[in-house]
Image (cartoon, coloured by chain):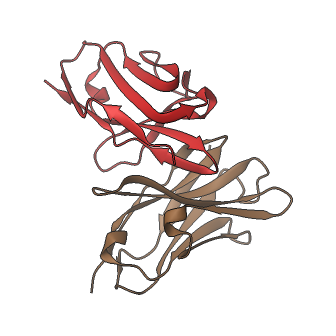
Amino acid sequence: EIVLTQSPGTLSLSPGERATLSCRASQSVSSSYLAWYQQKPGQAPRLLIYGASSRATGIPDRFSGSGSGTDFTLTISRLEPEDFAVYYCQQYGSSSWTFGQGTKVEIK
Amino acid sequence: QVQLQQSGPGLVKPSQTLSLTCAISGDSVSSNSAAWNWIRQSPSRGLEWLGRTYYRSKWYNDYAVSVKSRITINPDTSKNQFSLQLNSVTPEDTAVYYCASQQGVWFDPWGQGTLVTVSS
């Protein structure tokens, strides 16, 4: 099973700042099989990015994804108040799906 | 667009069976391009994919190794929904359970979530 490790655990930033979130895989992941989700308290996760870099429907262009192999990044170019949440990466491999443990983006 | 509505009890006794249902609107459980999943979330285990059912000329299931001996996911074409049954539950199965649609290998959208507590 591929393990995804996200860093940092918590990111304390101010609105307007840039957020850079990391997701590292224990073995190589196809870029086509890497996704990012946003989760706010009391809500289900919401798909942000699929195929490592494609934005899901309705996702603002301040969200971008990049990376390949074992290292992937989610970038939020300028944090809006509604972006403070927990973010998860997710991968598919060998008929199984795994998620990272999450990065919390909190208001500084 | 696809919407998923979950239902089922929030409290299950240890050793009994957890049962949840996910009603689909905006798509068909028999779709040849979608798959229908159950995922759970707990503080100790994080987000954990449990399994899925999908139709590709016949019905298929995939299950996570961690629950494979205890899980059943079934489609109900007459009601356009799918269900989760998890047998022999213990307190470690306490979690928020989500159903989720899948096109490709990502999950979108998700149901609203159901907190299931395993306790006597």
Residue lying furthest right in this view? B57
Residue B2 visible somewhere in the drawing: no
Count numbered badges in the picture: 0
Q: Which chain, by letter, is red?
A: A
Q: Nearer the viewer, residue B61 or B77?
A: B61
Q: Position of residue A96 (x, y in %)?
A: 58, 51
Q: Nearer the viewer, residue B75 or A6?
A: A6
**In this picture, residue B50 sits left or right of residue A7:** right
Instruction: Name the image quarter holding the C terminus of chain B.
Output: bottom left
**In this picture, residue A10 sits left or right of residue B85:** left
Q: Position of residue A92 (x, y in %)?
A: 58, 42
For residue A71, above or below residue B24: above
Residue plotted at (73% across, 72% down): B78
| Corner quadrant of residue A30 | top right
Residue plotted at (18% across, 18% down): A14
Q: Which chain, by letter, is brown?
A: B
Residue plotted at (54% across, 45% down): B109
For residue B108, above or below residue B53: above
Instruction: Name the image quarter holding the N terminus of chain B.
Output: top right
**In this picture, residue A21 sits left or right of residue B40:** left
Residue B28 visible somewhere in the drawing: yes
For residue A27, above or below residue A74: below
